[in-house]
Amino acid sequence: MSFNTFGQMFRFTTWGESHGPALGVVVDGCPAGLTLTPEIIQRDLDRRKPGQSKFTTQRREADAVKILSGVFEDERTDGPRTTGTPISLVIENTDQRSKDYSEIRDKYRPGHADYTYHQKYGIRDYRGGGRTSARETAARVAAGAIARLVVGDVNIRASLVQVGPHKIDYANFDWEQVGQNPFFCADAKAAALWADYLDDIRKQGNSVGAVIEVVAENVPAGWGAPIYGKLSSDLAAAMMSINAVKGVEIGAGMEAASLTGIDNADQMRAGQSKPYFLSNQAGGILGGISNGDPVVVRFAVKPTSSIITPRQTVTTDNRDTDIVTKGRHDPCVGIRAVPVGEAMMACVLADHFLRHRGQTGREGAVGFHHEDI
Amino acid sequence: MSFNTFGQMFRFTTWGESHGPALGVVVDGCPAGLTLTPEIIQRDLDRRKPGQSKFTTQRREADAVKILSGVFEDERTDGPRTTGTPISLVIENTDQRSKDYSEIRDKYRPGHADYTYHQKYGIRDYRGGGRTSARETAARVAAGAIARLVVGDVNIRASLVQVGPHKIDYANFDWEQVGQNPFFCADAKAAALWADYLDDIRKQGNSVGAVIEVVAENVPAGWGAPIYGKLSSDLAAAMMSINAVKGVEIGAGMEAASLTGIDNADQMRAGQSKPYFLSNQAGGILGGISNGDPVVVRFAVKPTSSIITPRQTVTTDNRDTDIVTKGRHDPCVGIRAVPVGEAMMACVLADHFLRHRGQTGREGAVGFHHEDI
Amino acid sequence: MSFNTFGQMFRFTTWGESHGPALGVVVDGCPAGLTLTPEIIQRDLDRRKPGQSKFTTQRREADAVKILSGVFEDERTDGPRTTGTPISLVIENTDQRSKDYSEIRDKYRPGHADYTYHQKYGIRDYRGGGRTSARETAARVAAGAIARLVVGDVNIRASLVQVGPHKIDYANFDWEQVGQNPFFCADAKAAALWADYLDDIRKQGNSVGAVIEVVAENVPAGWGAPIYGKLSSDLAAAMMSINAVKGVEIGAGMEAASLTGIDNADQMRAGQSKPYFLSNQAGGILGGISNGDPVVVRFAVKPTSSIITPRQTVTTDNRDTDIVTKGRHDPCVGIRAVPVGEAMMACVLADHFLRHRGQTGREGAVGFHHEDI
Amino acid sequence: MSFNTFGQMFRFTTWGESHGPALGVVVDGCPAGLTLTPEIIQRDLDRRKPGQSKFTTQRREADAVKILSGVFEDERTDGPRTTGTPISLVIENTDQRSKDYSEIRDKYRPGHADYTYHQKYGIRDYRGGGRTSARETAARVAAGAIARLVVGDVNIRASLVQVGPHKIDYANFDWEQVGQNPFFCADAKAAALWADYLDDIRKQGNSVGAVIEVVAENVPAGWGAPIYGKLSSDLAAAMMSINAVKGVEIGAGMEAASLTGIDNADQMRAGQSKPYFLSNQAGGILGGISNGDPVVVRFAVKPTSSIITPRQTVTTDNRDTDIVTKGRHDPCVGIRAVPVGEAMMACVLADHFLRHRGQTGREGAVGFHHEDI
């Protein structure tokens, strides 16, 4: 059963509501001996934190993480290390404004999970969306920071590549740019254009969707498993589990439908010690198993459902009404989904790394070790 | 662990290689008391069967299914019923032509999993791709036929909606057409056009990708679960696990990125006994839980990797070479993926139906039963 | 993967070390709509709490539980209710005395997991045994209190039935007595005798084992599942997972080996609306499925390994030494295992109840509802 | 979900009924590259096979196993090897005598699962007990034969140590004797005595229980996992899942209750390269993790429920009646449980070996490899 747990060998369980006292995550299956401090996790959390630009929600949360278990500092060693036991992380909610919730208590917000949670459970914590709030993704980012330690050399980065109808120009792609603009965008020109565009959207009381691309480099060949344990399958589940995601692509993605077999084949050439690929339509995965090329995943985030333009809806007792969702909302939730996408990639890879090592006794491909790659 | 098992409460495990003596599936968790005969399963298998038109592989397989367990006919009752114990299904392979496999034994076929399986396991059954052959999907279709019985009134259908760059016109969409052409296509005009197009592709020694749309109607509101047990997440994993799939979309899909919040909101109106939605951008799923609207999933299948146009590759001992993949291959594997997509939708829904019933004691939304919908 | 998670449909994940800042549990899969307050959980926690008599450790812990998520009080309803989302519970550690840990840091305590954790992980939190401390069982008791709400009418009680070689006399068995003595013992006479016996043991710097019997009444027939999902199998795993447990019995238990088929058969007679059993050698479980009779489980707890009589051991660098384990230890850890056994029984039954409801759509046996029983 | 699947990294799923056409098992997660032939599996199956002495059922089954997938013989290598894909094994049923089943169709056999299956599922395959027949254990033995290959040097053996009230004398314990008598008994004298005793029991139309002891040697320290993934917990679940088992013990077992801490402590001494234990009350497991000593498990099997002495029971429509269970039954099902216990031990260890390797990157304890032990 999955519910609120993700992963098998490296697994985490998140908990917490938007307006409860705290949210958190328990990371289980993390190998022992890794140096882990709150600072390492905080670094990633700070990238996802709200209120960092006018393009994200103005809710003020420090998102300060505490480690409650799973780490031990022996007085004879040089810092806190993971012990192989579950790592419990807690983030307190500090900016849950007291307000009148009767509007969202008695009406279903279109595009939100209000209606479906009510139908399923007959009760829902309507304050800020409760469990369905994107605040839950802070817990994922915390888990992802630990996953990064597990996969070591694997380098996981992401960029916003589309906002509304505006895509980046891959000719301008430069990872260095990602930290230089409020959009985590690798194309500086696109970022400049988006700033104006999003200002307009916000002023209209509207919102817009986005596409995020996540790339993992240095993944050795061999991670993944046949059929229903495919790396691609777990990545699809991981990304689709993020709030507001409606599509997931690996490599060529939906575009693969338009390609011919001649164009789609990633041809191979003999390398020094092992073969290499002339292209990466596969997105680094063949038959569900990594091929040594960068693993490339894209996912589409729908526009923020909370907008201040009135929308038709119904009350919880099935009467017609309108709703305007006031509050502190991201005009494009896709922006803050960038570090979340990285975190989920890290968690999936950490999980598959441990599974692969269990099945084969190797860190990478059979016959050579991770470090050889 | 997933490996070769899919699902939690309704789960199945497949086994078998393309050129082994047989392939099969064990379906576990199927409720007792359902009438099940080989004919019910065969009906679905026959739709996926190879060799039914010139647009699919000419391999001749009867794909005749045998039920080895889990079904019992009490002499006092009116037919074989499931007993709640595992249902073992076997399909014998009958048309594994004996041939010289040294070409694919010693070379990696681009786009196939030859290289990655070799890197992971150090050994691979190269005959017809072994375990990675799309023949495995016959086992899924068999499991799906049982899943359909579990979900009862839920109506699951699929259509090919794109072949290469050619999309259907949704204005022509008519489910009745699906059985009338060799493409499982709901748009008769598109199907006619594709016939010519695919003939060309095949004559060029080439192949092409496709997009399949799967729709489930009569899914009650409430199926699915929060966060990592989302119906959407499991559907994404299910579709991405199908051979050659590179992208999965729910509802608006990747296109959601281009929409604004105003357009994307599925507005609601009060209905007779419960509310209804004015549009279905959500694809029937909000917050990972079904909202009562049709569940709509699309997935992209890459072009068949086996083509008779030579492609550059390497030998298993890392020397440059070319390869031409002769054999009996589908020019567009996407065609036969249509019943496979239906089967995976059925299995995911059966699983979530049982989970939902366990969690809530209800078949549909809390407060009203499945039959009320 | 299990690790620190137990259960499938009703599942919980525990975390925390003996001398860390806190310990806790995340309960996932709890149905929505149940009234849950900290007091309900505290009631069970207080029964397990240390320092309640001279026969348990003198460590002073309030074991005060906080609910951080999963419960919501709508201002229109009459109290906090579960919402179907994960319930996070935290218990702070308040009495971790600062002391010199070098003795247990550098030596392996016989009977403890010091050596094996060191061998597995290469690092261990040696303060109070870290993760292996029986303090972890507080988290189980908290989860069990929630599980009791899930199973409703099912009545779960336990009694200590043996301390060292001294067994209770079942002729004296009276559930009312369990709350009247410091041993949770249903036989008042045995309890009196044990008091003297344990005083002696403690004065000798020794410790002793015990047997606990857990009984669940009002379990409807039909809970459980075939073969590897047996109720008995999950109960065995549950009890064996408790610290220091070395044996688990269902019904007649190990004694079943000595019985003949004539004596062991629980004969049946026709009852008013359904049959009943003339005896309960089966312990309420046949073929892994409940038969409607009380479910009876016993488990043996080994003597507390921490004793002040010196024992031979080795240092972490493999040199011979002796060890005396000072500290505040239970002379018979079996005593405080009584509420823990109840909790694990409750969790297993809650899990199987939800699974059964999912598989069959019924709360009890097919054809009649739970309430009919 | 478990149902008919056991294990996580090394996992198997069994299927089949006593009187269906066949039974079988799918083993998933077996590492690639192991030499596997039907003969290797048959060797273990033949030990469990019915009809080998007058003390087991006279049903004649060849129990001939076929391998349908997961093994590949490359023409360049020296024999069939596992490929990492699922291994499907089938055993045909050949001696299902056609007979009149109305007796067990209309009555519940005491001690059997007839009543509980009927209550749970509303339908049951009553022929020979259907799925609940001990014939299912043939599938486990087949899986266990593969598990033995996975754990390599680990040596797994079992002996019957008690039949009815008659225990072996451990002073006579000699593994060589196990193959020399029809009871798999390591004490030749006990075996001789049991022969007479069981003859008597059988002539009385009665049956009797038994205890089996399973020992695994050469298990490196470090296998297992904390809390709910304990090696001991999984072993308890494994053994309790075997038909008719009512008790499971690790090391000192239930007897641990009677011991004092002084006697129970397995003291340690410094060895050449690592410490060793002076006793093995722990049964090779501390804190759920192997300590390098032999892993010792015992389990009690209740007497065969099918006896020819009439017992009181009820009809399926709740009327009083008697039943005599004719047929070909083992007077002591415990005998044939010996190879089954070995198989379950092998499967649990194979699973934990792979999990441990995944978590730590080591085959045995951290810092030294399996082969060093």
Image (spheres, coloured by chain):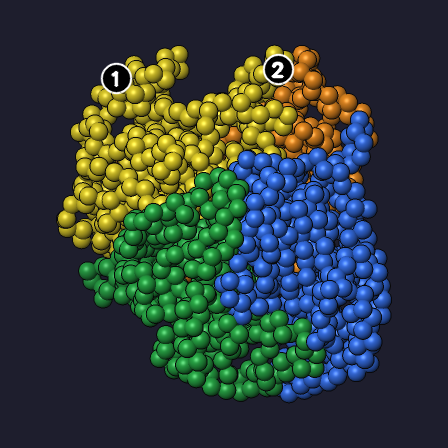
Chain colours: A green, B blue, C yellow, D orange
> Secondary structure under badge 1?
helix
Left or right position of B136 against B189: left
Whether D125 is drawn above or below C112: the answer is: above
Report, in whole angstroms, how far the alpha carbon at label 1 lies from the one at label 2: 43 Å
Q: Nearer the viewer, residue B196 or D204?
A: B196
- Kind of residue at badge 2: Ser
Answer yes or no: do the residues labelled 1 and 2 have beta carbons within 8 Å? no
Q: Which residue is mark 2?
A: C273
Name the residue at 49% across, 60% down: A244
Q: Can residue D251 be seen by looking at this rendering?
A: no
- Kind of residue at badge 1: Ala
> Secondary structure under badge 2?
loop
Q: Which x, y percent locates residue A334?
A: 45, 67
Q: Which residue is mark 1?
A: C192
Examine the image and state in which quarter residue C157 appears.
Answer: top left
Name the residue at 32% across, 63% down: A58
Left or right position of C316 against B23: left
Tell me the tag on residue D137.
Answer: none
